[in-house]
Amino acid sequence: MMNYDLGKGEYENWVVSDVGFSPDTLGKSESIMYLGNGYMGLRSSMEEPYLEETRNLFIAGTFNKFDEYEVTELPNIADVTRLDIRVDGERFSLEFGETKEYVKQLNLKTAELSRSFIWTSPKGKQLRFQFRRFVSLENLHLIGKKIEIEALTDPVSIVIDSGVNAQVTNSGSQHFHEGEKRIFDKKFIQSIQTTIQSKIDVVVNTAHKLTVNGNEVKNNPLMVMERRKVWLQFEAELQPNDCLSLEKLTTVHTSRDKDLFVSRDNYSLESLREVSLANLKAAHARGYEFEFLDSKAAWEEKVWGKYNLTLNSEDSYDLLALRFALYHLTVMTPAHDERMGIAAKALSGEGYKGHSFWDTEVFILPFFIYSNPEVAKSLLKYRYHGLVGARQKALENGYEGAMYPWEAAWPTDGEVTPIWGSVDIVTGEQTKIWSGFIEQHITADIAYAVWQYYKISHDQDFMDNYGYEMIFDTARFWASRLEWNDDKQEYHINNVIGPDEYKEHVDNNAFTNHMAHFNIQLAINYYDELKETNPDILESLQGRLNLADSYLLWKDKLDKIYLPQPREKDLVIPQDDTYLNKKIINLEKYKNQTKVGSMFLDYNLEQVNEIQVTKQADIMILFLLLENKFSQEVKQANFNYYEPKTLHDSSLSLSTHAILANDLGHTDMAYSLFRRAAEIDLGPAMHTSDAGVHAASIGGIWKSTVYGFGGVRMLDGKLRINPRLPKHWTELNFTIYWQGSPLHVDINKDSLKIKSEHASAVEIEVFGKSYTFTGETEIAYRQ
Amino acid sequence: MMNYDLGKGEYENWVVSDVGFSPDTLGKSESIMYLGNGYMGLRSSMEEPYLEETRNLFIAGTFNKFDEYEVTELPNIADVTRLDIRVDGERFSLEFGETKEYVKQLNLKTAELSRSFIWTSPKGKQLRFQFRRFVSLENLHLIGKKIEIEALTDPVSIVIDSGVNAQVTNSGSQHFHEGEKRIFDKKFIQSIQTTIQSKIDVVVNTAHKLTVNGNEVKNNPLMVMERRKVWLQFEAELQPNDCLSLEKLTTVHTSRDKDLFVSRDNYSLESLREVSLANLKAAHARGYEFEFLDSKAAWEEKVWGKYNLTLNSEDSYDLLALRFALYHLTVMTPAHDERMGIAAKALSGEGYKGHSFWDTEVFILPFFIYSNPEVAKSLLKYRYHGLVGARQKALENGYEGAMYPWEAAWPTDGEVTPIWGSVDIVTGEQTKIWSGFIEQHITADIAYAVWQYYKISHDQDFMDNYGYEMIFDTARFWASRLEWNDDKQEYHINNVIGPDEYKEHVDNNAFTNHMAHFNIQLAINYYDELKETNPDILESLQGRLNLADSYLLWKDKLDKIYLPQPREKDLVIPQDDTYLNKKIINLEKYKNQTKVGSMFLDYNLEQVNEIQVTKQADIMILFLLLENKFSQEVKQANFNYYEPKTLHDSSLSLSTHAILANDLGHTDMAYSLFRRAAEIDLGPAMHTSDAGVHAASIGGIWKSTVYGFGGVRMLDGKLRINPRLPKHWTELNFTIYWQGSPLHVDINKDSLKIKSEHASAVEIEVFGKSYTFTGETEIAYRQ
């Protein structure tokens, strides 16, 4: 059972708690309280094992393919979290005996997970337990654990098995050779494993320190090795009030570590073994508390002190949700390595296999562009490196340029969307997943993101070296993708999936067509601009992009692209060529369900295809991205038409609707949609996050706050801030980066205060009026 | 907690029971009550899952290698036994609530596993459960399950998830591609998977029938597919006294099935799919009870009615143990396919990976030679097919002829012993396993077994087609293996491991040298004999075995082989060149431990090597195999010397000692050793069988009964019966096959009655006197 109010004093509104143990809802806190640092993600499973647990450790970028039939995925790394504890010979588990004062919590500020309770064993022995754990933001390779067990009533003997368990799989698929296991000096456990296809070496080192009442227990533990497992067995006898403490520090390194090896050419397993073991020994010598303080300080410096995001709401949940979002945006993002992207389920679960979707560019990147442009750049460079795979995909599909994969893993992998999904209730076979073939808008989404980054950051260097090439090559894809319709004398884009994945094989999905058009338009604009300002760049790209011919094609085709427009009678834009002709049914049974996809208990996808039902924001996300192209009236009419038909069965849907609702002046509805969006992971429902947190939805929490209530947008290269706080809120503060320097924004109900760190004047637009200022300015407004 | 007395009426002394549920001792009944039919082995895990469970289904012969670093092994097949049951929303588990009248039992006569109890849920709802299960001996592909749940006190809703789970691994190694999963007609689940290296297709089909009070529940269950999993969710509402019954019939087929496909040339996956589904549908239509009766009838006909093994003991455990042995000898043996051997842990666990050792020839084959010669022949043909791998191994090691692998899998695989074992407590590394390199006596053991089979069965056809070739080619290996010692002017066999695996890299292990000598002698004898009687066979073998030259070598070397002899002072035969010079320590701490290998908590193997300590019968097994070569005095002296130094850390040890003790006239000691041997799996210790039953030890139960107390041997081609019943026994009866026809043997304290089915006279020797008879004879004797 979730609780949001247990943080006190300096930790008020910083603590997420689960205050009732249940073996049936383990996934919730495992997922939403997972620890990480972008390098790795460690699911917060309990130490003691439970049947329904999911124990995961992922390291960003270590993709491997189990066999030729599966797609590459982030493999589950050997586990170091499990402890098998026996109290007087009885297996310790909260399923037995009695548990009091149970609380498991994540302190967002310090990024420490803790769990404590008083447990009475079936035999009646009472003990106090405390478990603590962190993944360091200072030493990206380090996992710290510390447990304390105090005997409260009786003398007890404690036996703890702890080590490295490499029997873990990804739901049965084993990505590693067994590898080498070793115990140095009867103390330092080392496991070295290599992925079976991508041949990445992963080294896990772990060491323990056992004390009773602060005195180190010196007798050697029993050493055990079994297949894919190595562990130590510790024993201690406790008298009443004795307190046992076991620290377990672990380091994890791989042959992909950029901080260690620039390339595989100067890599050796021997050096990896030594470096990683040395790292462990140093951490072990310093101990849990010191290492934890270092990590806590890093969180203060790199996260909380940097983003300055606060708000004042009648309901403190809102602030907690924002902090929860910033916490997760930090731990999910491999900011240390531009060859890695953000996974749809972050690093918190097997769901979506660690792959990157448009979720990054459309729902998460805005946060980084405005709050931490260096990280935004790294994420865009990931897509730049992905041009290799995108060009390969275009080639394979008979197109030109760069056709980005719907799901991306290692940049050179290309398309990695799996082909078969869940059961088709009609045929009894697996449903075919078409996204990897025909969900193509991602290519334009990435070009759009490059443009956004550029316009907000003014990072010309990035554009010169990476951005223009991406925009040109994506435009080249679209130009080759367009299909000439002779009857209508216009270009169509047929047989696609738009953002609404409940409509497969549609023609002229409005979002896709408009975004493709935008992408080509961008390319033309930049071509024209560069011709004036920097023809050398055009020159250097000419060879591999055939730019001059491409430019002619773009110019020729641009205005002939069919762009679905509002119908005259009701201003509704057809989502695609056939949507508005499909059957309308009563969707009450399927709307507002905690469990998404409920419609598939009654229909298969083929049948859903024939109904006016939408999975998620489709036209709405078009309105958000190309805001200036549509009038308020058109937006309102389409909101009214489509929202009732939208099941919000994707976590990408609610935050977009929240922002749109706010834009349209429906602040109460916007707040209610924001709350629903902010509850997808953090809320009280105990099963929504079982397969992992929803990265895009977490980006959406920030987005619906700063884009939505804060009203921040970049429009035509200009910064606009139209705040509209919900009635529960009195204040909203954040720092954004605009053209390379921070702006500190303080919003309250009737004024907007901005402190600029820019040397020169900054221009912003607020409710249609333009303001130019240096230093600090305060602008009164009325909602 | 084990109970042996619950069989009543016709099932008296037929039922093995575990009468106390404990989550800590699941391995015991999973293993010793495992079901099988030689085609497959199904570990008897509970339906509802437990943390410490091991859920295994193995199909004989389906070997696969996970990667180039592991050895091939029997992969764990997708599970169909697990059921997730919810009672009014609570997960059913015996770890919760209260359980009364718990009993899990295996009826050896019918080969049905059952489990029943009354369970009160944590919420206080009381229900009666009964689970039944069999693996058919009539339809080798069929697994039947039936569960009954009766509501005793309250209305309850029952939800059951049941299907096929292919997430299973071998301790983390995944042997299968995910493959295809399918539900036909919302009812018949099919999973088709292929092994990743050996490319064996495995099809699992399953179907359910749900009734309440005998009326079939017709509403369709929910269908679910996840990664490597497919299942149905059944729901039923029970009123007090309502009884739910769920039958689940499963068929398992593979592309290696000999009954379906003679070779892979006429194999198609489509036909496998159809045949297996048709088999399932037929079984499903007939239902659990009919299929079970068919299987029960097959057990009566093929096992109990054939072997006629009974005894009368003061302690009924002895008869149960014998029946337990016959049950297991039946379920472990792939009698249906001569390309398959018996696994050291039978088909009951991952231990030893499904590999065949000398265990088969020395400890199990005697049972089949005397009781079911057809099966013995099939097992020897497995070794004949194994000549391919054996010749390969010889070649790789620089020898000639056939050097049998220490561990064997598929006949053409050759040596498959793994190279790394458990932890070395001194170095912290894994201990190297040398058996695959230097434990070489198995080659002579197999030749010995061929000879035994021939002499007992008089199966000339087998010899002509297979046996002679095996004896000649093994002799060729030994002739090339012998090392000339110039000092001593004799042939040595250096750097080996004998049966005592606690002595590695020894020279002239007595057992090895004597058996090699015997092997060569055999070859010479048969060469001489064939030259007279059937030179065509020599001719046909001449080409590939270079027989004429080999024969000269054999003749030249035979008498120069060093055969360790009893020392003059005490008649002790040195186990090897250095054993008798090693340190003698007090072994009290390590002898008679339930958990074997206890010495390795204090020493590593290198240290154990330097102590006069023996893992298992070494000289003793030599005495048993080459009985006529050693006097009673020598046997007694060596028993006295070595037994106290023998830890019996191998399950192969006790039965040999039991027989030897009986031969030496120590009937009480023999009985006590027999009991210990018969308790290795069946006895009250709850952890000895966790990794699987001990196939050789089970063969040893029969052997110490019929060889030991029955005194049956083949000596120099003649049948000898010197019975010596323990004082607890008044009667022992069994049928043996001698030269192709049965002899029914009834032994009591002072007489031996034999009923011969031979047409002509039979000659036997009893206590030194020869008897020739037809029909029935009774011979008085005095123990």
Image: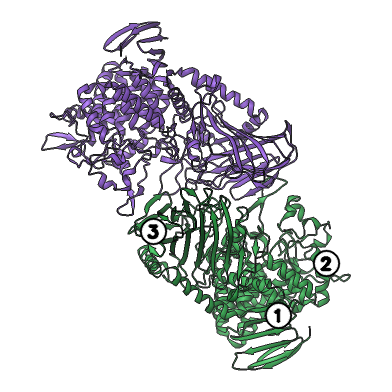
Chain colours: A purple, B green
Q: Is residue B136 visible?
A: yes
Instruction: For marks 3 and 1, give the CA distance.
Output: 51 Å
Residue carrying label 1: B710
Query: Which quadrant of the figure has residue B325?
Result: bottom right
- Mark 2, chain letter? B
Please determine if labels 3 and 1 lie on a single subunit.
Answer: yes
Residue carrying label 3: B189
Closer to the chain start, of discs 3 and 1, is: 3
Q: Is residue A545 visible?
A: no
Mark 2 vs mark 1: in front: 1
In the drawing, what numbered circle is on residue B641?
A: 2
Comparing B416 with B370, the one in front is B370
Comparing A558 with A58, the one in front is A58
Q: Residue A10 at x, y = what percent?
A: 55, 19
Neighbor class of circle 3 (other Cα within 10 Å; few <14, some 14-19, many 20+) is many
- Disc 2 marks a residue whose amino acid type is Tyr
At mark 2, the secondary structure is helix
Q: Relative to B128, is A184 above or below?
A: above
Neighbor class of circle 2 (other Cα within 10 Å; few <14, some 14-19, many 20+) is some
Q: Measuring 53% from the left and 75% from the top, which residue is drawn there?
A: B299
